Image (tube, rainbow, N blue to C red):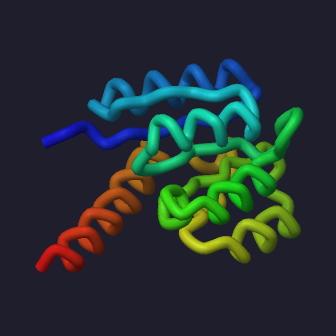
Amino acid sequence: MTKKKILVVDDDLVQKDLYLQVFKDKGYDVTGANDGLEGLDIALKFKPDLVFSGIIMPRMDGFEFVRNLRNNAIMAEVPVILFSHLGREEDKKKAEKFTKVTFMIKGLAGPNVILTKVKELLDKKNEKLEDKTT
């Protein structure tokens, strides 16, 4: 069975490196990007099974990044976790307008909570793929 691929997008290098390591330690194939623009380019080549992204980033923020992903046929159905420093209600509402986007708040959701959510989203994705093949 091939490893599930996760793309981590964040301009906060400490956070990005932390989650790259957390996911790698759990056996995922991971790669990172420093902002949405770089993330979009990598996503189209890497074709991740899940994207874990910050919101406030230079060049292209998390919302614009997700909008661009959703406009691409290959990436339209890939689950995304938007991870926010601020946890602002307007950010949560904005995130909920996208399909397959989970909004989580840094500080409230530590690595174990994130890993549980990642596994849940990837398992859901696998179930849908199995349904299509039967």
Number of numbered tags placed on the structure image: 0
Q: Name the quadrant containing residue 15.
A: top right
Q: Residue at x 57, y 20 (%)?
A: 17
Q: Nearer the viewer, residue 66 or 83?
A: 66
Q: In which quarter of the image is residue 93?
A: bottom right
Residue for point 20% across, 39% down: 2
Please determine whether, in this image, residue 26 is positioned above or below residue 80: above
Q: What residue is rendered at 64% in x and 56% in y?
A: 69
Position of the N terminus, as image quadrant, is top left
Q: Is residue 11 above or below residue 39?
A: above
Residue 113, above or below 98: above
Most foreground residue, 103 or 38: 38
Point 54% across, 69% down: residue: 100
Q: In this view, does 103 lie to the left or right of 8?
A: right
Image quadrant where one finds the C terminus: bottom left
Q: Is residue 4 left or right of residue 38?
A: left
In the image, is 9 to the left or to the right of 80? right
Q: Nearer the viewer, residue 42 or 8?
A: 42
Residue 57 in sight from this viewpoint: yes
Residue 104 in view in this figure: no
Q: In this view, does 74 lie to the left or right of 84?
A: left
Residue 80 is situated, as x and y percent measured from the top left of the image, at 56, 56
| Residue placed most toward the observer, 134 or 116 | 134
Q: Pinpoint residue 92: horizontal percent, then vertical percent.
A: 76, 67
* Residue 85 placement (x, y as % from top left): 78, 43
The quadrant in which residue 94 appears is bottom right
